[in-house]
Image (cartoon, rainbow, N blue to C red):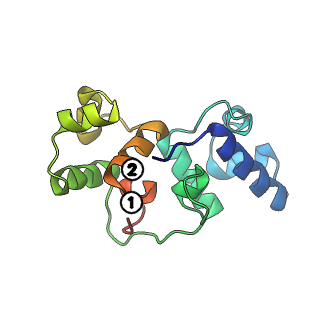
Amino acid sequence: MFTTKPEILSDILKEYMQLNDLTVNVFSQRIKVSESLVGYWLQGRYFPGLPNALKVADLLGCSLDYLFGLSDVPTYRPGCANVDFADRFLLLLTQHRISKNRLAHACGISSSLLSKWLLRKSLPKIESLIKLANYFNCSLDYLVGRSDAK
């Protein structure tokens, strides 16, 4: 079972910014978020939401799994299909023949939250994505539709 800590993301961001001689201001402008938000990530206070995590991974050219310390390999293979999280999540539920209630119990996530994700009313937090990726034995990039490779 993989877990992660915000400090891992912080270290990766600091290293990237140092290697590319970027200030917090320039980095935040490139991913179109506030400087204070980037500051929180750099302090290891918390994770970015999924949309911002995707922006960061795209800028760094790395996998979400690398960004959150779940893999030592930064590269990933971008997917060809236009699949979003809800589509991929539904596919995984179907392939694994598991109900939302059973998955909710297994992962410690409320069933109503799983329903909101499937209905595209909200997106999961990184911590929840990690639980799902562990359960389905797939990468974060696969789970969110960013890659076709599990």
Q: Residue at x 43, y 58 (%)?
A: 139
Image coords of residue 93 (percent x, y)? 20, 49
Q: Which mark is residue 64?
A: none
The three-letter code of the residue at mark 2 reads Ala
**Residue at the image point whose x is 24% and y is 27% from the top:** 112
Disc 2 marks which residue?
Answer: 133
Query: How far across and down, in percent of the image, does residue 61 sit?
Result: 61, 65
**Would residue 38 appear left or right of 71 to someone viewing this image?**
right
As measured in the structure, the alpha-carbon distance from the residue carrying label 2 to the one carrying label 1 is 9 Å
- From the image, tell me which residue sits under label 1: 142
Q: Nearer the viewer, residue 76 or 24?
A: 76
- Residue 127's place in the image compared with 2, above or below, is above
Position of the C terminus, as image quadrant, is: bottom left
Asked if residue 38 lies left or right of residue 107, the reply is right
> Mark 2 touching mark 1, by CB under 8 A?
yes
Badge 2 marks a residue whose secondary structure is: helix
Q: Is residue 34 above or below residue 139?
A: above
Report the side of 56 relative to 137 (left or right): right
Task: Tell me the kind of residue under disc 1.
Answer: Tyr
Residue 108 on image: x %, y %: 34, 30
- Along the line of sight, which residue is nearer the eye, 121 or 131? 131
- Residue 113 falls in which quadrant of the image? top left
Left or right: residue 4 versus residue 150 is right
**Where residue 106 sits in the image (x, y, percent)?**
28, 36
First in residue order: circle 2 vs circle 1: 2
